[in-house]
Image (cartoon, rainbow, N blue to C red):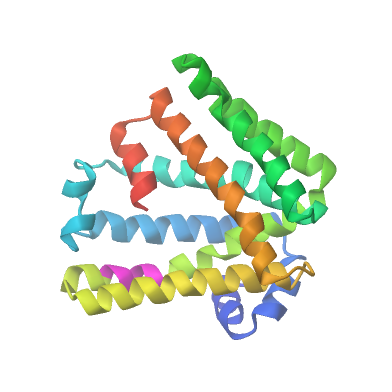
Amino acid sequence: MRILYSIKLFFKDNKKYSEMMQAEKIAFFIKIIILSVVIKNLFLIISPHTFPEELSFEKAGITSPTLLEYILSSIISLYLSFLIYIPILSFNIKNEFSFIKMFLTNIIFTILAAIPFMIKIKAVYSIFFIILPLLFLIFSLKIFRKEYLYLLKTSISLHIITIVFSPFIYLGEVSENEIIYIITNLISSLAYLIYYIKMIKSRFDISIPKIIIYSIFPLIVSFIFGLLLAKADLFSSNTIKLILYQ
């Protein structure tokens, strides 16, 4: 699919987009990621980040971030999504456990991610941050490849929402209009949630409550890995804070 056509189809006929997406080659999704990262970071760079005051760079403790720090924060966010969030979500959807079994198996993933905090050795934080996600990825591709690849394509496709809404969010910031800013962010967040659910439901026969429940633990584990990254001191403070800010 051409990029402009795919953006139009994504919103106009998401079911058709989801079907066509499955046949697309990797080059298409690489283009979406690159376009999303470029547009999002472009508006992050040119924004004054002074409005709203409680979400300003000053309040977040971010000081004159470099282009490299912006790019690294985007890459790490993708790393957390592709190698942690999506593998665990794929596992949950593939097995369609009862709530108790899903809860217990996901607790194991959470404990695995939390092990470095028990050991309290900085080198261990770095090793776990790099090795465990790679094991999640290998496990995904070996055991539930089809589910993982569909959800990976879905995750990348949802960046279309970032591409479309980033300019409007920027306008809300520079105009310093609280109503425009809140409404724009609310609409973009709702759009992400709605299309996230629609795209999963178009491929898997599971209810909306299950989709939400299956998504909670991957989110928790991803957050834990974000803390590991902060503890490991692999990247600058600005980079870590930009990940949370975005």
Please provide percent x and percent y for residue 80: 54, 43
Please provide percent x and percent y for residue 209: 65, 67
Q: Is the magenta stretch mostly helix, strand or loop?
A: helix
Between residue 26 and residue 103, name the one nearer to us: 103
Residue 168, magenta (yes or no) = yes
Picture layout, residue 41 above or below residue 5: above
Name which residue lies at 18% across and 69% down: 174
- The answer to whether residue 234 shows anywhere in this view is no
For the record, the magenta segment spans 165-170
Q: In this view, does 173 lie to the left or right of 160?
A: left
Picture layout, residue 135 above or below residue 10: above
Please provide percent x and percent y for residue 146: 81, 54
- The answer to whether residue 190 shows anywhere in this view is yes
Say which quarter of the image contains residue 198.
bottom right
Name which residue lies at 78% across and 67% down: 204
Between residue 73 and residue 200, name the one nearer to us: 200
